[in-house]
Amino acid sequence: MSALDSALRKALRPFFPEVADMHLSDYKVRILDGRSGTGATTRVLIDSQSAHGTWSTVGASSNIIEASLQALIDSIEYGLTRT
């Protein structure tokens, strides 16, 4: 998750310098319906914070990287609306 977060922030920082003030404060992964094996849905919950407050976002997919990216993008988009 750290590498994904770093890469996304590095790409966005020249256009949105506000992302430098946002930070991940927690990252949680939950498997929904584990009986489905590798096809189970993974839910990722990200807690973020900045000087403007804290917020949480969720991503879900059978692919943990995709679920993480969904939650991370939503977190950054929401954080930018708060600045």
Image: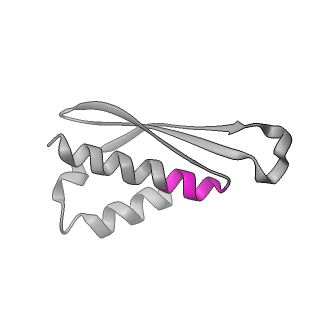
Quadrant showing the C terminus = top left
Q: Quadrant of residue 33?
A: top right
Q: Is residue 25 left or right of residue 29?
A: left
In terms of depth relative to the viewer, which is nearer, 17 or 29? 29
Q: Residue at 17% across / 58% down in the picture? A: 17
The x and y percentages for residue 82 are 18, 40
Q: Residue at 46% across / 47% down in the picture? A: 71
Q: Which residues are magenta?
A: 63-69
The x and y percentages for residue 36 are 83, 45
Q: Is residue 25 left or right of residue 21?
A: right
Q: Residue at 40% across / 60% down in the picture? A: 6
Q: Note whether 18 is above or below 28 in the view shown.
A: below
Does 64 lie within the magenta span? yes
Q: Residue at 19% across / 69% down in the picture? A: 14
Q: Coloured how?
A: one colour
Q: Quadrant of residue 51?
A: top left
Does 68 lie within the magenta span? yes
Say whether residue 27 is visible: yes
The x and y percentages for residue 68 are 53, 51
Q: Residue furthest left?
A: 83
Say whether residue 1 is visible: no
In terms of depth relative to the viewer, which is nearer, 3 or 33? 33
The x and y percentages for residue 69 are 48, 56
Magenta region, main secondary structure: helix
Q: Note whether 65 is above or below 46 in the view shown.
A: below
